[in-house]
Image (tube, rainbow, N blue to C red):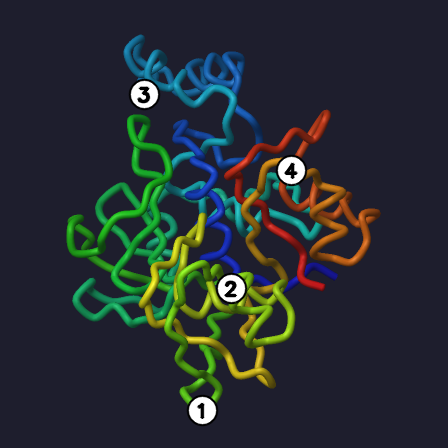
């Protein structure tokens, strides 16, 4: 049985795409690494879109995963528990098709503070990730980027009918405040206050921190109480690769057994020699 799809899972997915600098290729949906053959195939499929100039500009995304603006939502819904994204015609929609599919929607000035709702302008769609920000696959010259909601001409919002929207963030009774000290890191704070450095994911989730999770001396962070736990998402956490890491060592550190490296490879679509690099953000299955 496939893990249920939620707005929190969608937000975690698009933030991973953002952190890994995924690109934009018209007609793709982030299911594969882009090659010259990919671009040539898309040029034959969409000859009006792929002018000589557009083909050249698309080549900047060779070697990365890429997709168009609708691809973020499509890829999340098409992704199985094994991490592979498999085509499903039910989710192959244009930007306007996604808008029409939304059964709960409204003008942009009524957007609720619910991460994971879609935002629309004519012919384009993005994912609202909260705190006034949107992640969008903006165009061939931009790739996947984060922009301020107020800085783009979004006109409306809508909820994806195929996912569950959950709002189960902890209330203030389950949170304490902590002033960052010199030398602190989310890991060291989690180890000191929560008894396990691996619970740093709860701190970065609660405070909306992004990789590489930089914090400043004197900064005030919200920290879950030791008897509460913040769910980083629907079954996945985000981990920033350090020098010397391997899928095996990450699995041993975070999942308790190096043998579980296969789960990390599958979830992130790693292929071949499973090369990873410092600064890369990987999705990690929750224990």
Q: Is residue 73 above or below residue 203?
A: above
Distance from Cα at disc 1 to Cα at disc 3? 54 Å
Q: Please, what secondary structure does the residue beneath circle 2 have?
A: loop
Q: Nearer the viewer, mark 4 or mark 2?
A: 4
Q: Is residue 204 left or right of residue 229?
A: left
Closest to the observer: 27 or 277? 277
Vertical arrangement, residue 24 with respect to residue 168, above or below:
above
Label located before the other in sequence (4 or 1): 1
Circle 1 SS class? helix
**Camera-side mark, 1 or 3:** 1
Q: Residues within 10 Å of mark 1 (few under 14, many from 20)?
A: few
Give the residue displayed 27% in from the left and 41% down from the top.
Answer: 123
The residue depicted at 66 percent of the width and 34 percent of the height is 270
- Quickly name the residue at label 4: 269
Picture quadrant of residue 229:
bottom right
Instruction: Report, in whole angstroms, how far the alpha carbon at label 1 lies from the one at label 2.
Output: 29 Å
Q: Which residue is mark 1?
A: 173
Q: Earlier in the sequence, mark 1 or mark 3?
A: 3
- Counting other residues with Cα less than 10 Å from the Cα at mark 3, is it few (<14), some (14-19), or many (20 or more)? some
Q: Is residue 272 left or right of residue 68?
A: right
How far from the left and from the top, in percent, is residue 233? Answer: 55, 64
Q: Could you tell which of marks 4 and 2 lies nearer the N-terminus?
A: 2
Dot 3 or dot 4, earlier in sequence: 3
């Amino acid at each position: 049985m496939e893990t249920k799809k939620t707005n929190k899972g969608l937000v975690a997915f698009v933030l991973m795409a953002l952190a890994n600098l995924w690109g934009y290729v018209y007609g793709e949906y982030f299911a594969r690494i882009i090659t010259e053959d990919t671009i040539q195939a898309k040029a034959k499929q969409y000859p009006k879109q792929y002018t000589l100039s557009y083909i050249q500009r698309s080549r900047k995304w060779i070697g990365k995963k890429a997709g168009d603006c609708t691809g973020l939502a499509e890829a999340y819904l098409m992704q199985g528990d094994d991490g592979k994204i498999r085509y499903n015609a039910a989710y192959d929609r244009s930007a306007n098709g996604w808008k029409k599919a939304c059964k709960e929607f409204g003008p942009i000035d009524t957007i609720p503070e619910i991460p994971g709702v879609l935002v629309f302008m004519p012919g384009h769609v993005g994912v609202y990730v909260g705190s006034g920000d949107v992640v969008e696959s903006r165009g061939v010259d931009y790739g996947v980027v984060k922009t301020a909601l107020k800085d783009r001409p979004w006109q409306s919002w809508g909820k994806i009918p195929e996912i569950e929207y959950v709002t189960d963030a902890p209330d203030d009774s389950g949170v304490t405040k902590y002033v960052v000290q010199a030398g602190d890191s989310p890991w060291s704070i989690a180890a000191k206050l929560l008894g396990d450095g691996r619970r740093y994911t709860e701190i970065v989730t609660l405070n909306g921190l992004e990789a590489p999770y930089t914090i400043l001396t004197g900064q005030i962070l919200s920290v879950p109480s030791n008897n509460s736990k913040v769910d980083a998402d629907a079954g996945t956490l985000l981990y920033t690769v350090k020098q010397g890491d391997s899928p095996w060592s990450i699995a041993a550190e975070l999942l308790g057994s190096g043998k579980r490296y296969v789960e990390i490879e599958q979830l992130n679509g790693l292929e071949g020699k499973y090369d990873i690099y410092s600064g890369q953000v990987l999705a990690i299955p929750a224990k």
